[in-house]
Amino acid sequence: MPNSLTAADFQSLRMQYKNTRTEEEIPCTIEHNFKDGRMVDHYFVVPAPSFWQDEAVRGLGTVENLLFLQQDDGAPWHILLHEPAMVREVTFEMPDAEFRKLLDANHLILPGEPGFVMP
């Protein structure tokens, strides 16, 4: 896992809305574009073993949260990992097609996108 991640690097993704975090989940934020601008939503993610085996991830020690940032014009998403002090971060990229696979695998549609229904 050099500088990019795939959908396979995550076991699950679900909205925080009215949910309680489980022990293996990490809070994450998804900042994405929609027709009226930009939106920020809060989720819980469970990284796969491949994620934890990455040297850069291990170098952080503890991962406090993740931030998925959509880039314009279909460019790869940026994924920022933060350690508890929020002083150091590690950044990966994820192709848009892989991010969409992650959403599909978890039966998610981002708020503001066609088909989204509030849980």
Image (cartoon, rainbow, N blue to C red):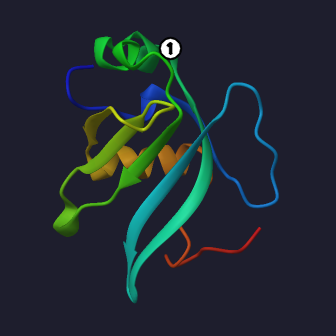
* Residue shown at the point (82%, 45%) measured from the top left: 20
Q: Quadrant of the C terminus?
A: bottom right
State left or right for residue 27 relative to residue 1.
Answer: right
Question: Where is residue 8 drawn, in percent x and y?
Answer: 44, 28
* Residue shown at the point (35%, 33%) measured from the top left: 6
Q: Is residue 14 visible?
A: yes
Q: Is residue 80 above or below residue 57?
A: below
**The one of 24 and 64 positioned closer to us in this rendering:** 64
Q: Toward which corner of the image does residue 108 lie, by quadrant?
A: bottom right
Q: Residues within 10 Å of mark 1 (few under 14, many from 20)?
A: few
Question: Where is residue 60 drawn, in percent x and y?
Answer: 39, 20
Q: Quadrant of the N terminus?
A: top left
Q: Is residue 91 above or below residue 36?
A: above
State left or right for residue 118 relative to residue 10.
Answer: right
Residue reaching furthest to the bottom: 36
**The one of 92 and 65 positioned closer to us in this rendering:** 65
Q: Amino acid at mark 1?
A: Pro
State left or right for residue 105 relative to residue 67.
Answer: right
Q: Toward which corner of the image does residue 25 lie, by quadrant?
A: top right
Q: Which residue is mark 1?
A: 49
* Residue shown at the point (80%, 51%) measured from the top left: 19
The secondary structure type at the circle numbered 1 is: helix
Question: Where is residue 113 drawn, in percent x and y?
Answer: 49, 76
Q: Is residue 48 above or below residue 78?
A: above
* Residue shown at the point (17%, 68%) measured from the top left: 73
Q: How many marks?
A: 1
Q: Is residue 108 visible?
A: no
Question: Where is residue 12 drawn, in percent x and y?
Answer: 61, 36
